[in-house]
Amino acid sequence: QVQVVESGGGLVQPGGSLRLSCAASGFTFSWSAMSWYRQAPGKERELVARIDSAGSTNYADSVKGRFTISRDNTKKIVYLQMNSLKPEDTAMYHCNAYYTYYASVHNYWGQGTQVTVSS
């Protein structure tokens, strides 16, 4: 059974930090590109950060220098360290796992964890 479970969200003041975690099971984690997306009310979902199976990363311009994505293949967890948080970072954050195996595509989503940045 595939599971992708996010945690670590919450309410934080501007300038603060949070670390999100995404625990995965039921599929080949080490093969997967793992990503964090976010969606704010009334806005489209956007890619925040991605780390591929080799450990290469990319980030949305809006979070570069503030957020860091990392993965632990032994624990099957991907992290998103968020520093210098801004009110515009407020959104539901979702974890995504994606890999292909021959002709099959595997694309899994978690339920999300809410991040609210407010004073």
Image (spheres, grey):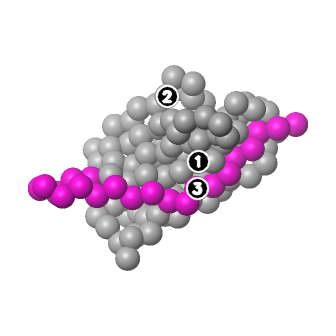
Return the x and y of residue 11 as percentages of the image width and height.
Answer: 78, 48
Q: Is residue 104 above or below residue 63?
A: below
Assess disc 2: are there few (<14), some (14-19) or many (≥20) residues with their C-alpha within 10 Å of its C-alpha: few
What amino acid is labelled 3 in the image?
Gly
Indicate which disc, 1 or 2, sits on the residue closer to the N terminus. 2
Residue at mark 2: 60
C-alpha separation, residue under disc 1 versus residue under disc 3: 5 Å
As measured in the structure, the alpha-carbon distance from the residue carrying label 3 to the one carrying label 2 is 18 Å
Give, as a single range, the part of the protein colored magenta: 99-119
- Horizontal side of residue 84 vs 22, given as left or right: right
Q: Secondary structure at mark 1?
A: strand
Residue closer to the observer: 77 or 45: 45
In the picture provided, is 28 more to the left or to the right than 19?
A: left
- List the residue tagged with mark 1: 93
Q: Which residue is mark 3?
A: 112
Mark 1 and 3 residues: CB-CB less than 8 Å, in contact? yes
Percent position (x, y) of residue 40? 64, 39
Q: Name which of mark 1 and mark 3 comes first in the sequence.
A: 1
